[in-house]
Every structure is written in C-alpha cells, then in structure tokens.
C-alpha cells in the first residue's frame, strides 16, 4: 500500500488548488441531488406520465445500475483523455439529464435522461476523489477528500425533503430544471479553475478483469499481498483514473 501512496504523492502539486477542489465538490453535490430527487417526487411524476409509481421508481433504479457499470469502466474507457475535460463532460451530462427529465412526455424519454445521469454519477464519482488527490499536496489530501464527501452528505440529506417541498410549490418538472443549476455553476467553475490533468499511465480492460477475478486471490490477506495490490494500482493509482 505504501507504494500506492508514493505513486500518488508524486503527482501532488506544490500548492493546494482549493478552488478546484470546491468546484469538484459542487459538481458532486449537483449529481447526488439529481440522483435522489425522484424519491420525493414519484407520485406527481407517475401521475403526469400516466404510469404507476412503481414504474416511475425505475428512474432511480436505472440511474444506480448505470452508475455502477460506468464507475467500473469509465477510467479505462477514458484513459487517454485529459481528466479536466472528462469531468466537465460529466457535468454537461447532468445538465442535459435534468432538462430531459423536466421535459419528458413519456417514461421512456425520462428513463433515457436518467441513464445519462447514471453515466455522469458513475464517472464523476469514480474520478473526483482521485482528481482531488492531484490538486493538493499529500498533506492536504484528507482535507480535500473531506470536502468532497461532505458535499455528498449534504446532498443526500437535503435532496428528498427539498424536492418534496419545491415540488408542492412549483411542480416536479420545474424542480428538475432548478436541479441543473448547481451543475451549470460547477461546470463554469471547473472550466475556470481545473488545471489540465493528463493520465500518467494507461490502464486496460484486462486490468479491470484482473481486479474483479476473485479466484486467484482466494485465501490470501489482501493488505499483505503485493500481487493483490498490483491490479488496483494499475487501474486506479494512477493508471486510468487521474
């Protein structure tokens, strides 16, 4: 594990880029709010689209499933692309997703918008923490990660009650339009403060399969096994994720 930390520390800047860290935190906040909003708006969404609440609830399920797959694959799929542009692309996806949901006239179109959100959540979440570790010196990494995880906590707490309250006042469609605002602000902020961050090395899909294959490491203690650690270092520190 010490070799992992050393590899990451070599990418650390001399001075912390706190504005960039806060821009990432705002992006995470917008994504998590968008993810949990339907939980408090299922009844009006279902009524408007002419479907059952159970069917409308698939908006949450679809997002989570796509986020899971994207989180596993996105690092390798974008291994040759500047992380600055990848992260901003995910912010754009969240904006597009919220607007698609807001103007959806069918469940299929709404689910398509939510699938885009799943891509944005899985990708942004997989990369944001690793990116934060490249924006600050090693000594400031705990603070940078705490800022990002705090954004997740706040978004998780406020999304459902705020969505329910605003839904009663302005309607669920307008709530999703408003939901695009944090990501729009995050996008503009990221465009301004995020530095260019090229991947330092190249990971492959075979690396991912090695990480997911359990049989080779059965019966071993992961923390003491360098053969177990190596695929994770290849994939995440700093292979495909920044």
Image: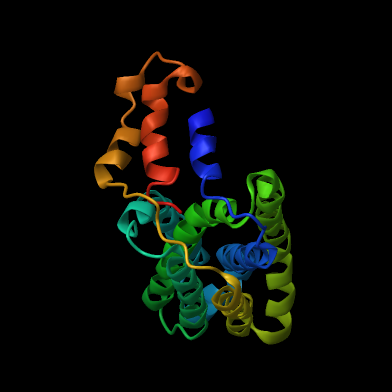
The chosen color scheme is rainbow
* Picture quadrant of residue 32: bottom right
Q: Name the residue nearer the viewer: 231 or 105.
A: 231
* Picture quadrant of residue 218: top left
| Residue 1 visible | no
Percent coordinates x, y for residue 22 in the rendering: 67, 65
Percent coordinates x, y for residue 227 in the rendering: 36, 23
* Left or right of residue 40, residue 187 in this image: left
Percent coordinates x, y for residue 25 in the rendering: 64, 62
Residue drawn at 68 percent across, 71 percent down: 163
Q: Looking at the image, how many numbered discs can be counted on the residues?
A: 0
Image: 160 above or below 139: below
Residue drawn at 37 percent across, 74 percent down: 108
Residue drawn at 43 percent across, 75 percent down: 110
| Residue 87 visible | yes
Q: Name the residue nearer the viewer: 192 or 36.
A: 192
Q: Name the residue nearer the viewer: 14 or 130.
A: 14
């Amino acid at each position: 594990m010490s070799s992992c930390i050393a590899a990451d520390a070599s990418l650390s800047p001399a001075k912390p880029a706190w504005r960039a860290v806060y821009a990432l935190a705002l992006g995470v906040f917008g994504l998590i709010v968008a993810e949990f909003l339907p939980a408090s708006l299922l009844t009006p969404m279902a009524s408007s689209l002419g479907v059952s609440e159970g069917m409308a609830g698939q908006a949450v399920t679809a997002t989570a499933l796509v986020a899971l797959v994207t989180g596993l694959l996105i690092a390798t799929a974008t291994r040759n692309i500047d992380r600055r542009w990848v992260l901003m692309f995910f912010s754009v996806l969240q904006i597009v997703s919220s607007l698609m949901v807001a103007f959806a006239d069918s469940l299929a179109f709404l689910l398509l918008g939510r699938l885009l959100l799943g891509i944005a959540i899985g990708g942004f979440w997989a990369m944001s923490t690793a990116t934060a570790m490249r924006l600050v010196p090693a000594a400031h990494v705990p603070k940078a990660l705490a800022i990002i995880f705090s954004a997740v906590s706040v978004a998780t707490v406020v999304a459902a009650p705020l969505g329910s309250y605003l839904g009663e006042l302005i309607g669920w469609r307008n709530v999703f339009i408003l939901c695009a605002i944090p990501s729009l602000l995050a996008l503009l902020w990221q465009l301004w403060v995020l530095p260019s961050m090229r991947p330092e090395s190249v990971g492959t899909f075979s690396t991912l399969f090695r990480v997911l294959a359990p049989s080779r490491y059965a019966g071993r203690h992961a923390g003491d096994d360098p053969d177990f650690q190596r695929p994770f270092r290849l994939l995440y520190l700093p292979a495909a994720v920044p």
